[in-house]
Image: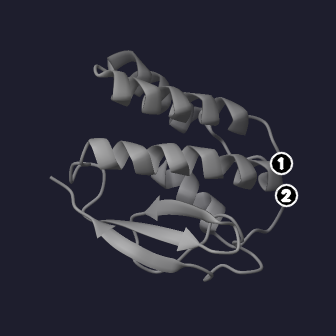
Amino acid sequence: YLVLSRELGEIETANRAYDTDGVKQSAAGLLAIASSPELKKVAEQIHQATLELAGKTTAAQRESFKKLSDGVVKLVGLVSPTPAIANSLYLFHCPMADADWIQSEKTIANPYYSSSMKSCGELVKELKTQ
């Protein structure tokens, strides 16, 4: 997720499909180990969102990324990430996209409008790692 968030947040040079295999594999792994009903529901949302990303144009992937981010934000609310994921994680909100996202850098790199409004958004909070 963090790799895709970073890639979508970079200045766009071409309308291409980003590689989503890594995030799909991670989502499938999460779904396989989800134990509680609440965690399983969030894992299913994340997994479904990753399937919707595959092979789409950048514009379509940005739209589908909203669903993925929503699921990942819910996941982080249920299970605190470890420092192995990142030393620090930040939750941002883009009012123009009406969507949140998580990234490992404090400087805004908006994955929804990276070319036209790369710095649009606001830091909501730093997410604690355990």
**Residue depicted at 78% across the width and 36% down the height:** 55
Q: Which residue lies most toward the top here?
A: 32
Q: Quadrant of residue 56?
A: top right
Which is more toward the observer, 74 or 102?
74
Tag 2 and tag 1, C-beta contact below 8 Å: yes
Q: Is residue 16 visible?
A: no
Mark 1 or mark 2, which is nearer the start of the sequence?
A: 2
Query: Which kind of residue does numbered mark 2 sit on?
Result: Asn
* Position of residue 52 measured from the top left corner of the image (x, y, whole percent): 71, 34
Instruction: Pinpoint residue 122: horizontal percent, then vertical percent.
Output: 50, 80
* Residue 57: mark: 1
In the image, residue 54 sits, relative to residue 120, either above or below, namely above
Whether residue 36 is situated above or below residue 120 in the rendered picture: above
Q: Is residue 36 left or right of residue 115?
A: left
Q: Determine whether the residue tagged by mark 2 lies in a helix, strand or loop.
A: loop
> What residue sits right under mark 2 in the picture?
15
Q: What x and y, as percent, mark residue 4?
A: 57, 52
The residue type indicated by label 1 comes to Thr
Question: Residue at left 36%, top 29%?
Answer: 38
Image vertical order of residue 18 relative to residue 121, above or below: above
Can residue 13 be seen in this snapshot? yes
**Quarter location, residue 13:** bottom right
